[in-house]
Amino acid sequence: MNSPYYPIFLNAKFLACLVVGGGTVAQRKIETLLESGAAVTVVSPDVTDRLDDMAKQGRIEWFAERYDERFLQGKNLVIGATDDTGVNERIFLDAKKAGIPVNIVDDPEHCTFIVPSVLAKGPLVVAVSTGGAAPKLAAKIRGELETLIPDEYAVMIAKLQALRPAIKRLPADKKENFWQTIYALEIGPYTGKPEQLRAYVEALLQRFSGQDK
């Protein structure tokens, strides 16, 4: 893999995130973090009306102050989204020194991680990155992938996720056969038929569990 970036999916429920900045760009980053279940602290003298409402609702913690290194304490992810290059550089240097992953929006030279263009269909998530070289091209590729990946895959994955404990209990040989059957499944005939797809997956599990009648 000819890239300095290591692809990884983090469980946001374990993340305490600091976002410095309160404009529309910061708002987009914050909303995505919240959707993933992260805890978010915002530092900015001013914020958008939407972020102000989030703070009043207790969805985020907002400090109406200028950035200071002390706000890094207890954080394990940092995003800088201000329009002040000097402040952004301080955020980057402070976070890097503290060993905390940091992303300065639209400035890959001041990032220890970058955020990919994401295609999400339920539990199915596909991330596309150009290493920060061409974000709009990454977005274009993501759009092309969206037309190639049927929504029914998300339906099937969600059902498999729900059945995971039962699948894990299958004997090794039956488990292997179950997954091989899933991998070989033609998804096309189930287009627009989510209930039939869910029923098929459940019936398949029952068959390999010896519970079908």
Image: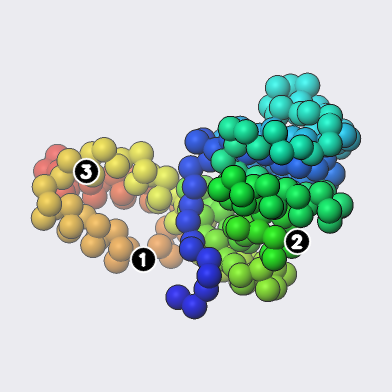
* Residue 186: assigned label: 1
- N-term mark: 2 or 3: 2
> Where on the picture, by quarter, is residue 18?
top right
Q: Which residue, given by chain and number where applicable, does mark 3 sit on? A: 168
Q: Left or right: 124 with respect to 202?
A: right
What amino acid is at disc 1? Glu
Residue at 15% in and 45% down: 170
What amino acid is at disc 2? Asp
Q: Report the Cα–Cα distance between label 2 and label 3.
A: 43 Å
Residue at 84% in and 36% down: 66
Q: Report the Cα–Cα distance between label 3 and label 1.
A: 23 Å
* Residue 106: assigned label: 2
Residue at 70% in and 60% down: 110
Helix, strand or loop under label 1: loop
Q: Are marks 3 and 1 in contact (CB under 8 Å)?
A: no
Q: Report the Cα–Cα distance between label 2 and label 1.
A: 40 Å
Circle 3 packing at 10 Å, graded few (<14), some (14-19), many (20+), is few
Most extreme residue toward the front is 97
Helix, strand or loop under label 3: helix
Q: Quadrant of the C terminus?
A: top left
Q: Quadrant of the N terminus?
A: bottom left
> Toward the viewer: 170 or 3?
3
Q: Left or right: 46 with respect to 109?
A: right
